[in-house]
Amino acid sequence: MSDMTTKTAVPRKRSRRSSYNTGHPIVPWLYLLPHAIFFLGFIIFPVFYGLYISMHRWDPLLESQPFVGLEFYANLFKAGTPQSEFFWKTFINTAIFTVVSVPLLVGTSITLAVLLFKPIFGRAFFRSIFFMPGILSVSVMGILWKWLFENQSGLVNIILTEYLHLPGIPFLTTEGWAWVPIVLGTVWWTIGFNMTLYLAAMNNISKAIYEAAELDGATAFQQFRFITWPNLSSTTLFVVVTTVLGSFQLFGQPQLITGGGPVRSTQSVIMYITEEAFSNNQFSSAAAMAFMFGLIMLIFTAFQFWLQTRELRGSKK
């Protein structure tokens, strides 16, 4: 009898972790399922339900919701209707705010990024100072800037009258001047985010390029023009598009600072859509306005992407 014993192979016990990794094709879709449920429930369904409301005379207190087709869309282009008058007036107000605020937000943020990119004393402190307003809610920001520009007791008017001996300006009740606290407050409130994006992008530019430029005698402006600015083109595209879209969504600042006045001169299109729905109880009309506004923003964004990407391709040739 041989001393050698036959060893039988004992099958390894599969770990709990490997038992879940079946390699079945459905497994990746199961990971995507929770997001898909929320996307369908909170994005897709509201969009199609809003489209349904805009094509019906919808009233939550009535059982019947008669179909009216494109009637509420046609009202936006029919002269004499309040929907046409106030929708386009508030849209122009929002466009004016965007035209004024976007260059300030982009230009000031890139200027701060260039200044705070240099190794100066207290750089981290100043970066924090400019970024901190962005953590405030719009309600806090609005109350603060309304207090600063109050017609009688505001800090700005106190400085004008008591220290500079100039006549006070009723900012909040004068057309034109009412935009000053809204624009300045928005720039102060949101500039830190764009500045941070530019700082992150500037960190990716090789320092060797700047060193070579200094050896060639390039000035600081020339370094910015020929090195910094071209390398920030993709970041600028993102900043401009997101800033434009954010500016067109203007709501909280004029709502809290001026209430949309005087005589709707600072009322944004989002404010009017909200008024049409919840003050005038015209939900179908408000839904049609929202879809029209969204379509305009979609076209504008596509055009902006096409224009700036064409410029980027042209600069690389």
Image: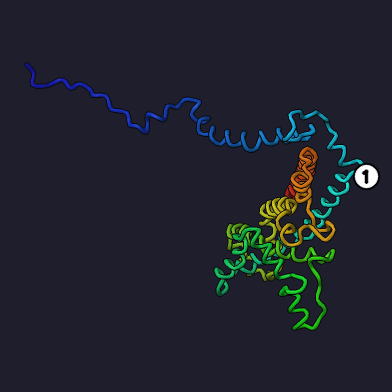
Work out which quarter of the rendered image holds the N terminus and state it: top left
Name which residue lies at 73% across and 47% down.
309
For mark 1, does the 10 Å Cα neighbourhood hold few (<14), some (14 to 19), or many (20 or more) residues? few
Q: 270 or 115: which is nearer to us? A: 270
67 relative position to 225: left or right: right
**Residue 7: x and y, percent?**
17, 22
Say which amino acid is labelled 1: Gly
Which residue, as the protein is rendered here, is positioned at the far left?
1
Q: 19 or 211: which is nearer to us? A: 19
Residue 223 makes an appearance in the image: no
Name which residue lies at 85% across and 44% down.
83
Name which residue lies at 27% across and 24% down.
11
**Residue 110: x and y, percent?**
68, 63
**Total count of labels:** 1
Instruction: Give the colouring mode of the picture.
Output: rainbow
**Residue 129: x and y, percent?**
59, 68
Q: Mark 1 points at which residue?
A: 80
Mark 1 lies on a secondary structure that is loop
Residue 100, above or below 73: below
Residue 227, above or below 316: below
Q: 94 or 72: which is nearer to us? A: 72
**Residue 225: x and y, percent?**
71, 63
Which quarter of the figure has residue 264? bottom right
Which residue, as the protein is rendered here, is positioned at the far top?
1
Residue 73 makes an appearance in the image: yes
